[in-house]
Image (cartoon, rainbow, N blue to C red):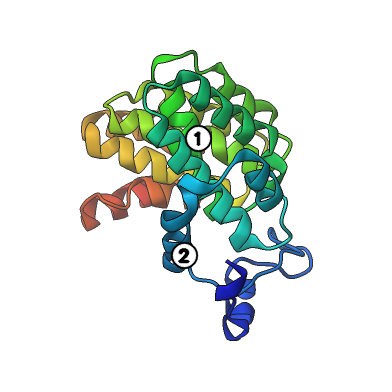
Amino acid sequence: MLSHADPSQVAGLSRFFKTGPGQYGEGDKFLGIKVPLTRAVVKACWNQTDFDELEECIRSEYHEIRLAALLTLVQIFTHARKDVALQQRCVDFFLNHLEFVNNWDLVDLSCYEILGRWLLDRDRSLLYALVSDGRTIWEQRIGIVSTMQFIRHGQLDDTYAIADIFLGKPEPLHDLLQKAVGWLLRDAGKRDEDRLRRYLKLNGSRMPRTMLRYAIEKFPPEERSAILKAV
């Protein structure tokens, strides 16, 4: 990863991931490596990487190296297949290092592939706890984005139940949480559009505007306009 650093890309990535004072990524550092190149490095190296090396990388000051660690963890977990002990080790590693999963891309590219897949046939109270009691917006975002895996398997109940928890939180809800909840509701709607419409009829009036816009993004323009005017 260090050999692929590109200083000319650092300023742009720093702006994109909001690393300025008071912004959600404040203080994060970049090497200037785009995601496709990071994925290529992971593809070449994941099966030669042990957990001690992952420990070093997840704690890196550089965003891209933390991302590489998480993408490597996804690969290890995925290829473990029926090795439940190894999968459990991956899940434990992820949960024990949440403080380093500290931007939206780090969350979105890892949690549903690890936590979501692990919880497909297990108790899911962990996700509810992350949403209700998460110390950071990233932990709370993990709680909702992990349900992407459930949606892909036609299981929609947890996405709606967790969305309800967010709607019960005191305003203002962080923009990145609004977007995540709206995104997952939209994807649940791809599986069952009528259910999403019923949910919006009951809850649309108390949904933050950004969340609502994301949730109805795939509706016909006339219907989107009518929903937004109604609330």
Q: Position of residue 83 (x, y in %)?
A: 43, 22
At horizontal 22% and vertical 31% (from top left) the residue drawn is 194
Position of residue 170 relative to residue 30, above or below, is above
| Above or below 44: residue 173 | above
Rendered-image quadrant of the C terminus: top left
The furthest residue to the front: 48
Q: Residue furthest bottom?
A: 8
Q: Amino acid at mark 1?
A: Ile
Which residue occupies the foreground of this view, 155 or 216? 155
Horizontally, residue 200 falls left or right of residue 142, namely: left
Query: Amino acid type of disc 2?
Result: Val
Left or right, 37 with reference to 29? left
The relative height of residue 210 versus residue 25 in the rendered view (above or below) is above
Residue marked by disc 1:
144
- Residue 150 in view here: yes
The residue beneath circle 2 is 35
Tell me residue 197's x, y (percent): 28, 34
Q: Tell me the SS state at disc 2.
A: helix
Residue situated in front as seen by the camera: 217 or 108: 108
Residue 109 shows in the view? no
Q: Nearer the viewer, residue 30 or 214?
A: 30
Front residue of this view, candidates 60 and 20: 60
Residue 225 lies in quadrant: bottom left
SS for dot 1: helix
> Separation of disc 1 and disc 2 at Cα?
23 Å
Mark 2 Cα within 10 Å, few/some/many (few <14, many 20+)?
few
Residue 230's spot in the image, x, y percent? 37, 45
Q: Mark 1 and 2 residues: CB-CB less than 8 Å, in contact?
A: no
> Of callouts 1 and 2, which one flags the residue occurring earlier in the amino acid sequence?
2
